[in-house]
Image: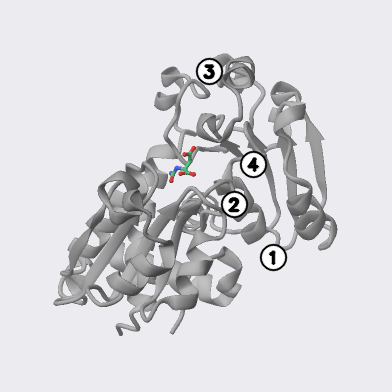
Amino acid sequence: MRHLLDILDFSTEELDELIAKACDIIENPDKYAEKCRRKKLATLFFEPSTRTRLSFEAAMYELGGNVIGFSEGRSSSASKGESVSDTIKVVSNYADIIAMRHPKEGAPMVASMVSSIPIINAGDGGHNHPTQTLADLLTIYREKGRFSDLTVGLCGDLKFGRTVHSLINALSRYSGIKFVLISPEELRLPDYVTNNVLIKNSIPYEETTDLLEAMPKLDILYMTRVQRERFFNEQDYIRLKDSYILTPDKLDNAKADLCIMHPLPRVNEISVAVDNDPRACYFKQVLNGKYMRMALILKLLEVE
Ligand code: NCD
């Protein structure tokens, strides 16, 4: 039995297979409409979500399956003090596969140790978010046609932004990748990612606070929200929240084929005026996420 806790749980060949499967689903949705008949997905969300939870649910329905679950810890027995392990042991009796999101780093790992069904990490604290990375990879593939030889700018809250950590891990396995890490000092990429991923694999990267200066070299600009819920004090959040606001004029020196991404939700970091720019890909990312989650569910349930 396989789980998806970290994007590195899948080889690059397996990621290629998932992308090929997602593309086939896009072309031939009817072929997949009954693939998960009588199967149940449990969505256990101990933390808020719009896209991730609803796209998992939509994915399972489009595969002909059913969904059970909860959308906040408060409405589950976690509020009575039940442990993650006990919740998972219970839900393993009701469902065939679990997608869970939890504010604590490592919670899905704990879940996988006691689960009799596949566990998908739908975000654990400020750590990882591998299924967002699946959405990001399909977007890059459809927009750029490759994962190699790209200069990727990551901008915003690189410290707490779990989507960034998973994306760096994923892209670090391809050749010719360069990262430009754009953040305020206080929100720099954590040392464990810089050391264990970038330095260890000799991936070229630069750190800067200046988005405008970085802009002309980028093939991809991945904007992120400042993660308010992970701050220890509100003053720091207020001081840092508007560090970067992408507006149309800031794109004047950008490449004509720049791909602008954002995992969403957006707060202020991309002005709505950018949405009309053909380089804005963040709403395409949302749809790609559903197709990749369909492909993922099929893979983990070993449905042919
Ligand atoms: C992201 C997350 O939950 O980490 N959202 C998402 O799943 N698309 C990004 C965020 O909350 O900022």
Closer to the camera in the image, 151 or 91: 91
Vertical comparison of 51 with 256: above or below: below
- Labels 1, 2: front one: 2
Measured in 3D between alpha carbons, the distance from the residue under mark 3 to the one under mark 1, in whole angstroms, is 32 Å
Residue that numbered label 3 is attached to? 248
* Mark 2 surroundings within 10 Å by alpha-carbon count, few (fewer than 14), some (14 through 19), many (20 or more): many
Q: Amino acid at mark 1?
A: Arg
Q: Amino acid at mark 3?
A: Pro
The image quarter containing residue 264 is top left
Residue depicted at x 15% and y 69%: 64
Closer to the camera in the image, 149 or 69: 69
- Labels 2, 4: front one: 2
Residue depicted at x 64% and y 28%: 254
Residue that numbered label 1 is attached to? 173
Residue that numbered label 4 is attached to? 219
First in sequence: mark 2 vs mark 4: 2
Q: Position of residue 89 (x, y in %)?
A: 35, 74
